[in-house]
Image (spheres, helix red, strand yellow):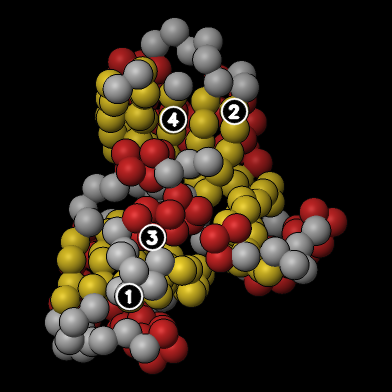
Amino acid sequence: MLYLEIESNAMHFVSLEGEEVQHSVYQMQHTLTFESNLRNAISSIPQTDGRGEPLRVLVCSPGTAMSLNDFSEEVATDVFRYCLPGRPKEEVMYDMIPEANAVWLFGIPKEQMQTLEHLFGTVYYASTMAPLARYTMSQTHAGERKIMVNCHHGWVDIVAVKGRYLELVNTYRVNGPTDVAYYVLSIVKRIGFSQTKDECMLTGEETFRNAVHTELTRFISNLQHHVDITRELFAYLH
């Protein structure tokens, strides 16, 4: 099975064959179109040889959660566009996160979908948020509280776990590390997180992640970097 995670500046290709895992990264050139970058990646990364099998795409983009009890496919697009205005050219999709009694709404540009399906044929889409939540839960034991902060250019994904139960999954638009600290500290207060003992995990884009780490050290003692969890995210896809 071939997997692809699309970030703002990179494409991660992961192939799984039995117990063997191959992971390659293509750094996107922002002077090129998405299609040109994808074609370059296909020609340079060995995992994409013989593309007869379906492709599973992990979409890394801002999203929003809604209660599983309130969810219906008929309202998903309206809710997404209300919460994340200014993105009319995106196809709205959703992932179930039953562990949090939630549905995660996310979008992918329609042009990217057309390119992917033209080059790979059968393509399945999922968000990074659901496997990120499951990965965070896997790192948490009964009685613990943990927060995962996934850093991107312009936004962060935050997962909060309390006693192996998901307390929160959400995306926050941010202008810098102080915004991240504001949202994290709000969640700290909500779940009773210990700023001296409980662990806050950081992952995502390196430069911004390091800046967030510097800011959060003013408030939280136990900060841990989970530098590259791409393989783990694919492992927690359902």
Which mark, by number, is residue 137?
Answer: 3
Determine the secondary structure under disc 3. helix
Sequence-wise, the earlier of marks 4 and 1 is 4
Residues marked 2 and 4 touching at CB (< 8 Å): no
Q: Secondary structure at mark 1?
A: loop
Q: From this viewpoint, is residue 38 visible?
A: yes
Do the residues under discs 4 and 1 have CB atoms within 8 angstroms?
Answer: no
- Cα separation, mark 3 vs mark 4, equals 22 Å
Q: Is residue 126 above or below residue 213?
A: above
> Residue tagged by mark 1?
143
Q: Which residue is mark 4?
A: 3
The amino acid type, in three-letter code, at marker 1 is Gly
* Marks 3 and 2 close (CB-CB < 8 Å): no
Give the residue at x 52% y 15%: 53
Q: Which residue is mark 2?
A: 123
Mark 2 secondary-structure assignment: strand
Q: Amino acid at mark 3?
A: Met
Disc 3 + disc 4, Cβ < 8 Å? no
Q: Nearer the viewer, mark 3 or mark 4?
A: 3
Residue 149 seen in the current view: no
- Dot 4 falls on a residue whose secondary structure is strand
